[in-house]
């Protein structure tokens, strides 16, 4: 990827796309193409076709997707399946039709079986049943990976896929009904502190374990792999370290300096018991994350709330 190459970042207003866009700018790429969802509805096949025919990008980061936390995934099951399938079908197919040199597809760690052995290796894909709360999203993402593989097999396209773990950082969603756990807890503890509330509601039992990666580290990994990696097998991206939701809640409570109590709302679902990626493959290719969790949370909190 040269500095003058035309690079399309699909989903540049989202958390991942905006981080990739910032990183490209930072590294001096000068020919970046973007469209907001109002300008270009990626679910619309003719619109995507004319966009690709007009722009003919050399490289594509496919970071556009409908995303959300455990409740949103469970509630808007049809939208998570339809929107994601439509977006990736249109973008991947037009990338092939318009001879894009290389495309990077963003998947998600929820593609793995609910009860996968931990840490999760890439080869565990499709070895067991999925977590029901996010099955539609996971099915769409699995289809995206398989599409990249099939277009490579049949047409020789250099399309690669990465599977990031749970992300946090700049441009995250803080809507309490739709957001993931980390941004939700930042907002809940912050508001409880400001309003001098006695307690904060945290969902589930606190025992599930999750791995968290700062989105700037993910963007760094995506640029690295766009330059260095050209194989069919998709690649996990994470830190290789996880913590329980209970530990996360306590860490955030400490960082924010909230003095009240944590109340566990056990009527809310726990979801997958543990989600920790095996990151030995990406380490082997030569990439490691840089941001320690505590530092990343503190920075995210300061930027968003202070
Ligand atoms: P998941 O990784 O797909 O399960 O998605 P989430 O990030 O939404 O949830 C991770 C875990 O955090 C689940 O066990 C949730 O029940 C738990 N959790 C605790 N409090 C919250 C909260 O306020 N919001 C969300 N989204 N999850 C929470």
Image (cartoon, helix red, strand yellow):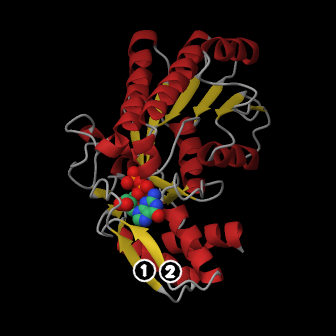
Q: Which mark is residue 253?
A: 2
Quadrant of the rendering where the C terminus is positioned: bottom right
Determine which residue is flagged by label 1: 262
Q: Is residue 74 left or right of residue 121?
A: right
Separation of disc 2 and disc 1 at Cα?
Answer: 9 Å
Identify which residue is drawn at 75% across, 13% down. Answer: 54
Of residues 50 and 226, which is closer to you in this image? 50
Residue labelled 1 has its Cβ within 8 Å of some atom of ligand 1: no
Q: In the image, 75: left or right of 177?
A: left
Residue 227 vs residue 21, the one in the foreground: 21
Marks 2,1: beta carbons within 8 A: yes
Decide: few, some or many residues near mark 2? Use Cα within 10 Å; few <14, some 14-19, many ≥20: many
- Quarter of the image for the N terminus: give it: top right
Q: Residue at x 37, y 64 (%)?
A: 241
Outermost bottom residue: 259
- Mark toward the start of the polypeptide (2 vs 1): 2
Circle 2 — which element?
helix
Query: Would residue 270 be visible to someone looking at this image?
Result: yes
- Asked if one can make out residue 212 in the rendered structure from this viewpoint, the answer is no
Residue pictured at 36% horizontal, 52% vertical: 279
């Amino acid at each position: 990827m040269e500095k003058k190459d035309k690079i399309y970042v699909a989903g540049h207003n989202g958390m991942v796309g905006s981080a990739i866009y910032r990183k490209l700018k930072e590294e001096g790429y000068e020919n970046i193409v973007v469209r907001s969802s109002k300008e270009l509805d990626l679910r619309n096949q003719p619109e995507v076709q004319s966009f690709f025919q007009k722009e003919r990008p050399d490289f594509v980061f496919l970071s556009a997707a409908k995303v959300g936390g455990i409740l949103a995934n469970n509630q808007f099951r049809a939208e998570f399946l339809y929107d994601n399938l439509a977006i990736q079908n249109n973008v991947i197919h037009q990338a092939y039709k318009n001879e894009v040199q290389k495309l990077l597809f963003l998947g998600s760690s929820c593609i793995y079986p609910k009860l996968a052995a931990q840490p999760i290796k890439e080869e565990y894909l499709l070895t067991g049943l999925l977590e029901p709360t996010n099955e539609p999203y996971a099915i769409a993402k699995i289809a995206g990976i398989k599409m990249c593989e099939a277009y490579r097999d049949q047409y020789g396209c250099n399309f690669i896929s990465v599977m990031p773990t749970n992300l946090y950082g700049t441009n995250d969603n803080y809507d309490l009904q739709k957001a993931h756990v980390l941004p939700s807890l930042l907002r809940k503890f912050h508001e409880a502190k400001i309003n001098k509330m006695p307690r904060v509601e945290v969902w589930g039992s606190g025992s599930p374990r999750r791995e968290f990666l700062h989105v700037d580290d993910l963007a760094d990994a995506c640029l690295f792999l766009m330059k260095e990696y050209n194989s069919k097998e998709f690649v996990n991206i994470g830190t290789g370290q996880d913590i329980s939701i209970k530990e996360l809640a306590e860490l955030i409570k400490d960082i924010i300096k909230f003095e009240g109590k944590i109340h566990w709302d056990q009527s809310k679902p726990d979801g997958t018991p543990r989600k920790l990626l095996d990151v030995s493959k990406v380490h082997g290719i030569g990439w490691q994350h840089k941001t320690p969790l505590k530092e990343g949370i503190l920075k995210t909190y300061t930027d968003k709330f202070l």
